[in-house]
Every structure is written in C-alpha cells, then in structure tokens.
Image: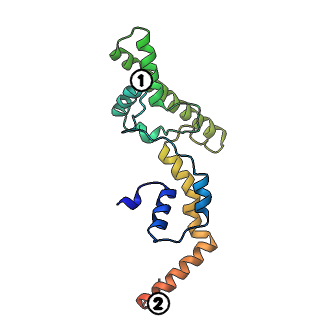
Amino acid sequence: MSFKKGDLLSRTRKLVKGLAKAQPLWLKAMEQAPPATFPRAAGKIPTITLPEDVYVKKFYKKYPESKAHDAIKFCAFDPPPSRVFALRVIELKEHGVSEQQAMAIADMEYLTEKKAKKKAYTRLKEIARLQGKRLPPNPYPSAIKEIQAEERKYVRDRFFNPKILEIVKQQKAEAMEKFGGGGDW
C-alpha cells in the first residue's frame, strides 16, 4: 500500500501525477513553503520510569481498592497516596533503613492516616447531628462516589427536563408506528 506512505504533500503529488486527482490550488504554494517535518524516533520509544514506580506497584498490589477510593486528580497539588507511600519508602531507604522495614513503616503511616481521616469525618458528623445541622459532605469521598455525585443531576434531569420528555414521546410514537400500537406504554 504505497499510496498511504508519506505526508499530505507527497501523497497529493502522487495522486496528481497519476491523474487520479486534479491539481489543487494550494499545491504550488505548499511546494514552495513545505510544512515543517519533525524527526521521528528510531525504533521503539522508551517508557519513562521513576524510581518510586516499583513501590507504587507494590502499594497497589497490597491495596487494590485504593485505585478506586483514592482518585488521582491531575489538577491537584497533593500526590496520590500511592506516590506518598513510595516517596516515603525511598526517603527511609536513603536514611539507611532496609527496604522491608521502610515499606512496613510507610505502610503503617498510610493506615494511621487513613484511620485518622475516617475518625475526623465521624467526629464532624457527630457534631453536626448534635447541633441539628445538615451532615457535612465527606471530605474524603471515594472516586466512584464523586463521579456518581456529578452524574446525579443528569440522572434526575431525564425525568423532569421538558426537552428530554419530548424526545421520549417522539420515540414512543415512532415505536408505536413501527411495531403497531396495541397497548399503551
């Protein structure tokens, strides 16, 4: 399939030369000032690996539920717990602690932080109940619950939005015409 090789300019030249296409107006201008060509990597592009990636993988092996509960927010300044864990292990290793001990310490710190967050939120709920106020939103929601909260307004919207209700009526009418209206939907 030689016709697929090359850039736009060379492909268009081949088509014009082979009389498969009339010469476009822009061809002469493009031949005089061709677009910039960027160098391509020779062979396979190497993957970028960071020193903490090994420990991030070990963290996710030990806590697979963390992938769903501790969402990675690209716009956030705080790194995800897996990165914090891995960086802590590397920091401890630099201070002369063995790898196993460093992982055990980082693991213990992660679990205590997670428990402290849960305890703080439980206390916030208790205070709100005592004061008779609405419960505060969970400051540490899981990624799944965050996505569901964002989608909730759209799910409810389908029952009350007049435009959506009109589309549903049209689809019902089309279905009745297509399949023969025997019963009421």
Query: The residue under label 2 is which amino acid type?
Result: Glu
Kindly identify the residue that appears in the image at 49 percent across and 67 percent down. Answer: 16
Task: Label 2: state its secondary structure.
Answer: helix
Residue 115 visible in this rendered orientation of the protein: no
Q: Residue 147: where, in percent of width, then height?
A: 52, 50
Residue with the mark numbered 2: 177
Q: Residue furthest top?
A: 96
**Mark 2 Cα-neighbour bin, 10 Å: few <14, some 14–19, many ≥20:** few
Query: The residue under label 1 is which amino acid type?
Result: Pro
| Quadrant where the N terminus is found in the figure | bottom left
**Residue depth check, mark 2 versus mark 1: number of the one nearer the observer:** 1
Kindly identify the residue that appears in the image at 46 percent across and 87 percent down. Answer: 176
Q: Residue 103: where, in percent of width, then height?
A: 37, 20
**Which tag, 2 or 1, sits closer to the chain's start?**
1
Q: Is residue 35 above or below residue 18?
A: above
Q: Residue 152: where, in percent of width, then height?
A: 55, 57
Task: Label 1: state its secondary structure.
Answer: loop
Q: Residue 2: where, in percent of width, then height?
A: 37, 59
Residue 79 visible in this rendered orientation of the protein: yes
Residue with the mark numbered 1: 51
Q: Give 44 or 57, whichever is nearer the viewer.
A: 44
